Image: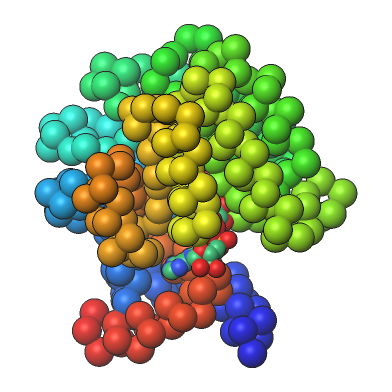
Amino acid sequence: MEALSRNFFLYLSKNKSLNKMAKRYGLKFGASKVVGGIDFDRTVSVIKNLNNRGLCTTVDHLGEFVNSVDETRERTAQEIHTIQTIAKEKLDAQTSVKLTSLGLDIDHHLVFENMRNILTEAQKHGVFVTIDMEDEVRCQGTLDIFKGLKTEFDNVGTVIQSYLYRSRDDINDLKKLLPNLRLVKGAYKESADVAYPDKKDVDDNLKQMIKDHLTNGNYTAVASHDDQIINFTKQFAEENNISRDLFEFQMLYGMRTQTQLDLVKQGYKMRVYVPYGNDWYGYFMRRLAERPANVAFVAKGMFRS
Ligand SMILES: Cc1cc2nc3c(=O)[nH]c(=O)nc-3n(C[C@H](O)[C@H](O)[C@H](O)COP(=O)(O)OP(=O)(O)OC[C@H]3O[C@@H](n4cnc5c(N)ncnc54)[C@H](O)[C@@H]3O)c2cc1C
């Protein structure tokens, strides 16, 4: 039943007509529970609200694939606007970007140029930028660009996914750059040629990666809703006298809100990933596919939003 429901929402997430309709009607069906707003200006009040509750944030502009150089430049300008708004509104916020929206599939020089413009503006305002990790075929390209940028900028980090066999080697290879890394399980459908098919191996590898990166003395963002991973991190840090300034937890906006607040109360840094933008529909459907329990959002949202 659960698999059926997952496939149903994944099917809906790819439906172009529904996507078009969603853009026309704004955040509906409870989507505002997991998406900050249809643009960044409308997301500011959501971030202020989170900040007032002790939660810091990273914001992500949701978007479809870009196909042209002009679209990547438009995305870059929008990202710069977001960074300027973060500074103007004094938000406790970082940004997260996907390199495909900045031209990864078009030309690496173009991505460097767009990222340099973004990071230069972000550096001016003390804003940190994380490069999200996309599917495995883009992993090496993303890491190459990250390494190039990291030699010029201190305010950039990236993501390593524990489902990939290569990831512990990547952490080892990157450690000399003293990188700030977000460690996750991984969100894409990958083949057993490159990724662990069993969840237990993905979980175990994430624990190993957390150990490796913290032991290397590098800043670690543990991005997971899984109590097992959160408790492991707390215990490992405690037993090894690792300062709470060296790591943080991250979760998605609208997921496990009480747990997020509990972690703040216990004195941990907790960052909420807040997506925003007109392309909210696919993201919303993927969250429903991931956790059909969230379908209750839809039922309630139908009457409210
Ligand atoms: C801040 C952030 C940034 C991310 N960035 C990337 C990225 O750049 N690239 C990428 O590939 N992936 C990214 N991801 C997604 C990530 O890779 C996982 O796909 C996703 O987080 C699901 O794995 P999990 O560790 O949260 O828990 P899962 O393995 O999905 O679940 C484990 C257990 O956690 C509990 N749980 C999970 N979700 C909930 C919930 N909503 N409510 C209650 N309990 C729950 C349940 O007990 C569940 O059995 C990111 C995730 C986060 C939180």
Judging depth in this view, the residue of 66 and 241 nearest the camera is: 241
Whether residue 183 sits left or right of residue 241 in the image: it is right
Residue 38 visible to the viewer:
no
Vertical relation: 9 (above or below) 36: below
Where does the image place residue 168, in percent across and percent down from the top left? 70, 32
- Taking the spot 40% from the left edge, 47% from the top edge, the residue there is 250
Residue 304 visible to the viewer:
yes
Vertical relation: 108 (above or below) 3: above
Where does the image place residue 190, in percent across and percent down from the top left? 75, 54
Quadrant where the C terminus sits is bottom left
Whether residue 171 sits left or right of residue 195 in the image: it is left
- Taking the spot 25% from the left edge, 56% from the top edge, the residue there is 261
Where does the image place residue 221, in percent across and percent down from the top left? 45, 37
Way the structure is coloured: rainbow
Query: Residue placed farthest to the right in the image?
Result: 193
The quadrant where residue 259 appears: bottom left
- Taking the spot 63% from the left edge, 20% from the top edge, the residue there is 174
Query: Residue placed farthest to the top in the image?
Result: 152
- Taking the spot 42% from the left edge, 28% from the top edge, the residue there is 242
Whether residue 38 sits left or right of residue 71 in the image: it is left
Query: Residue placed farthest to the front in the image?
Result: 239
- How many tags in the picture? 0
Judging depth in this view, the residue of 154 and 277 nearest the camera is: 154
Quadrant where the N terminus sits is bottom right
The quadrant where residue 116 appears: top left
Where does the image place residue 52, in percent across and percent down from the top left? 12, 49
